[in-house]
Image (cartoon, rainbow, N blue to C red):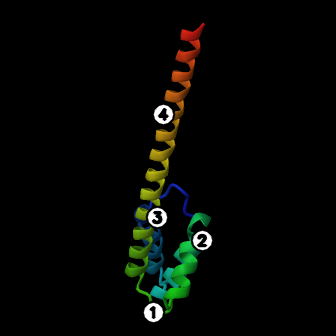
Amino acid sequence: MISEEGLIDNAFAKFNTIITSLKTVDEGFSSKNCVRKFLRALHPKWCAKVTAIEESKNLTTLPLDEFIGNLKVYEEVIKKDFETVKGKKEQSRSLALKVKNEVSDEDSSSS
């Protein structure tokens, strides 16, 4: 299975190495089979995207390069969403700390 942290480029490079090695021993795979095998190797977090690709594309004719391109675009969307959420959490923590400090300062000054 391709790990959650594994980038699509790295995962595809490893996958491609395996497929190339198999071709040298006459165990070649069609593009269709490569796409299906790569889909099965993805981490479960990719399940929604895999389902979308399966429903919107004809996997029997989908070129491997186009498939990988779709996954790379999705990977970038995930990264941007993660950074946005992370930034909002940090902003919320900062605001909460500021409010807490202001309350503490008010308590100290009223004593």
Q: Earlier in the sequence, mark 3 or mark 4?
A: 3
| Of labels 1 and 4, the one closer to you | 4
Q: Residue at x 49, y 34 (%)?
A: 95
Q: Earlier in the sequence, mark 1 or mark 4?
A: 1
Find out whether the residues at labels 4 and 2 contact each other: C-beta distance under 8 Å: no
x, y percent for residue 36 = 55, 81
x, y percent for residue 81 = 46, 58
Q: Which residue is tagged 4? A: 94
Marks 3/2: CA–CA distance: 16 Å
- In the picture, the disc for residue 61 is 1
In the picture shown, does residue 94 fall above or below 56? above
Marks 4/2: CA–CA distance: 34 Å
Q: Earlier in the sequence, mark 3 or mark 2?
A: 3
Marks 1/2: CA–CA distance: 21 Å
Q: Which residue is tagged 2? A: 47
| Of labels 1 and 3, the one closer to you | 1
Marks 1/4: CA–CA distance: 51 Å
- In the picture, the disc for residue 11 is 3
| Of labels 4 and 2, the one closer to you | 4
Work out whether residue 61 or residue 94 is closer to the camera in this orientation and state it: 94
The crowd level at tag 1 (other Cα within 10 Å; few <14, some 14-19, many 20+) is few
Q: Residue 104 occupies which quadrant of the picture?
A: top right
The crowd level at tag 3 (other Cα within 10 Å; few <14, some 14-19, many 20+) is some
Q: Residue at x 49, y 58 (%)?
A: 6
- In the rendered view of the protein, which quadrant contains the N terminus? bottom right
Question: Under tag 1, what secondary structure?
Answer: loop
x, y percent for residue 97 = 52, 29
Mark 3: amino acid: Ala
